[in-house]
Image (cartoon, grey):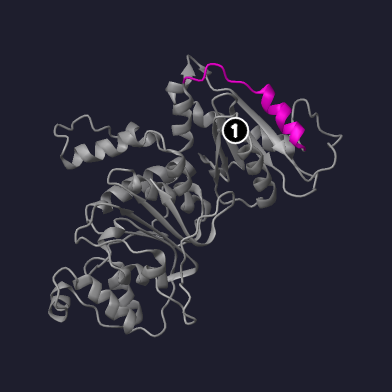
Amino acid sequence: MVNVIRGTSDKPVSSKKLGEYFEARDDIEGTLYLGYPIIGTAQGGYQIDALLVSKQHGVIIFHIVEGTNTVLDLEDTQDENITKLESKLLQHKELLNRRKLMVEMSVVSYAPAWYQYPEDIDTKEYRILITKDDLDNFIELCSWENNQCFEKVNSVIQAITTISKKNPRIYVKKEDSRGGKLKKIEESIANLDATQNAAVIETVEGVQRIRGLAGSGKTIVLALKVAYLHAKRPDWNIAVTFNTRSLKGQFHRLINTFTIEHTNEEPDWEKISIIHAWGSPRIEGIYYNFCKIHNIEYLDFSKASLLTFEYGKEFDYACEKALHNTQTIEQYYDVILVDEAQDFSEYFLRLCYEILKEPKRLVYAYDELQSLSDKMMQSPELLFGNNEDGVPKVRLENVSGEAKTGCCFEYLL
């Protein structure tokens, strides 16, 4: 079957139609990416409309046409699409047999709203697909017999090849050391599975929950998601927060690496904040910045411990008090991603939710069986509370077969 991964697309109607076609093709093994990949070039990030990576049919690039307009530089677009992707694949010697790329590649324009083929285009050289029969016939012509590098192609497309390529951890001696644990994580995601892929690329216009066991790749997924969102929307203010201080360096390295894969440039660190949860006058933090922006009292650990009667609840109390003492909350982030969410109370997650601009793009990832304080992760309905009408602000609701908008969507890694 074909896993359809729906990224953000400015051609939603035709993209949806293409996705529905491949979801009905249970005879094809592979992944269809919509609104993905973004390829790093000398001119910056280059967007591919849609891409099929299939064991039977190789790599097929879809130039998607929205609407009935036929006045397009279709030939130039197809040429640029295939040369950009080919140049990316050629950088990986595992995909080469001497100088020849071992990947079967095709490019085609998909225009489901057109009524006829344009007369001024040689459709034998520059294929245009309008109907379902056109899709059937074209895909039948595309074949990939020597597909032994299928997994490697997926890894390149997913922009994760540089994890193991850059600074390989050959020096690790102890498996249970910090370096050993990182090496295991990096090796385990040489290829993302369908759920990890979806969690990275699918854009949720609302809250997104990612859960899994320790070592299931949640930190990598969050870093990939930051890089993808930053490449798509460089104007967005994005924050990444966590409980373990040592994660800051790891997030910085991963986000930097993945962004270069997408855009051929380092990220704009003015738009991405890798920020601690608590913070202090010396170190930026989500909570500390909230207090500073809203001109309310900041509680450090010592002050919070004097005001709460339960050990381990100091930060919970500080966040609850900050929310209670703030009448009008400023909204200054477009996306916030929270790692290790199992270590935070509902008050910190609510604080993150409240400082987000609409439509409240909050991504929180947590380990199901691992918490520093034996906290149990509540449902989104309980975590984020109710609005003035008594209706939950966030509801868990997964809808298959469409882009993610509203509610809370869950990915189980």
Work out whether residue 241 or residue 397 is closer to the camera in this orientation and state it.
397
Q: Give the range drawn in magenta.
A: 131-148
Query: Which quadrant holds the C terminus?
Result: top left
Left or right: residue 16 versus residue 376 is right
Work out whether residue 153 or residue 166 is closer to the camera in this orientation and state it.
153
Residue occupied by mark 1: 26
Which residue is depicted at the point 18% across and 33% down?
Answer: 172
What's under tag 1, amino acid-wise?
Asp
Query: Which quadrant holds the N terminus?
Result: top right
**Residue 186 location, x and y as percent?**
31, 37
Q: Is residue 389 above or below residue 280?
A: below
Q: Does the magenta stretch include residue 133?
A: yes
Question: How many dots with numbers?
Answer: 1
Which structural element holds mark 1?
A: loop
Q: Can residue 215 be seen in this view?
A: yes
Q: In this view, does 392 lie above or below 51?
A: below
**Residue 106 location, x and y as percent?**
64, 27
**Residue 18 location, x and y as percent?**
66, 42
